[in-house]
Image (cartoon, rainbow, N blue to C red):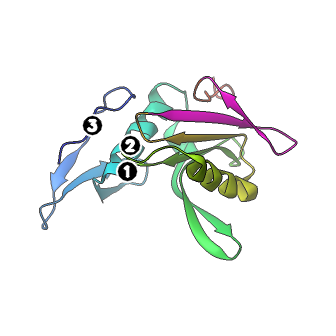
């Protein structure tokens, strides 16, 4: 399968072919091999971008972060935590052919009703939308990805 060039810097992946013939990549954050799906392709790019361009370290990045919504176990694709371990950014990743629409926005907002993160980011690798959470419960669009300003 050919994966599209995304609007993130190129990354280097450690890859192998599993017994089923599918390509797996090594996830350094979780320390395990994962099947390379179109959504995982986007997630790998975002994780590397968070580390290389936004100033977050690997210890702050949690993938498949558990979120309990109305008694139902769900998972946020990526959550970046602050120095105290509180959610700081929720990143919802979609594969590149999925539009970033209201439904994706509302999915991240639902997660944020539980997590109380300062920022939400929605990306399919080609389009990325960033929002800051306001005290009144609204969201303000941002021009760029939130950067780590506390760890410098």
Q: Which residue is mark 2?
A: 42
Gap between marks 1 and 2 measured at Cα: 5 Å
* Residue at point 64%, 28% (across, down): 151
- Mark 1 near mark 2, Cβ–Cβ under 8 Å? yes
When the figure is inspected, residue 73 is found, relative to residue 121, above or below; the finding is below
Of the pair 116 and 32, the residue shown nearer to us:
116
Q: Is residue 60 left or right of residue 19?
A: right
Q: Is residue 26 magenta?
A: no
Q: Residue 70, how many percent across, how many down?
A: 71, 73
2 vs 3, front mark: 3
Of the pair 98 and 59, the residue shown nearer to us:
98
Q: Residues within 10 Å of mark 3 (few under 14, many from 20)?
A: some
When the figure is inspected, residue 84 is found, relative to residue 141, above or below; the finding is below
Q: Residue 110, how many percent across, how many down?
A: 68, 57
SS of the residue under disc 1: helix
When the figure is inspected, residue 103 is found, relative to residue 80, above or below; the finding is below
Mark drawn on residue 39: 1
Q: Quadrant of residue 124?
A: top left
- Mark 2 near mark 3, Cβ–Cβ under 8 Å? no
- The quarter of the image holding the C terminus is top right
SS of the residue under disc 3: loop
Mark drawn on residue 106: none
Q: Residues within 10 Å of mark 1 (few under 14, many from 20)?
A: some
Q: Residues within 10 Å of mark 2 (few under 14, many from 20)?
A: many
SS of the residue under disc 2: helix
Q: Which residues are magenta?
A: 127-143
């Amino acid at each position: 399968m050919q994966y599209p060039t995304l609007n993130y810097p190129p990354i280097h992946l450690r890859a192998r072919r599993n017994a089923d013939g599918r390509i797996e990549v090594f996830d350094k954050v979780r320390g395990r091999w994962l099947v390379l799906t179109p959504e995982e392709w986007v997630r790998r790019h975002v994780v590397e971008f968070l580390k290389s361009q936004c100033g977050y370290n690997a210890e702050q990045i949690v993938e498949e972060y558990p979120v309990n919504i109305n008694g139902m176990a769900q998972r946020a694709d990526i959550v970046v935590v602050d120095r105290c371990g509180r959610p700081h950014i929720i990143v919802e990743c979609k594969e590149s052919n999925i539009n970033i629409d209201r439904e994706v926005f509302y999915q991240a907002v639902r997660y944020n009703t539980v997590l109380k993160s300062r920022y939400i980011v929605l990306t399919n690798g080609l389009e990325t939308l960033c929002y800051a959470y306001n005290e009144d419960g609204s969201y303000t669009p941002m021009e760029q990805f939130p950067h780590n300003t506390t760890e410098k």
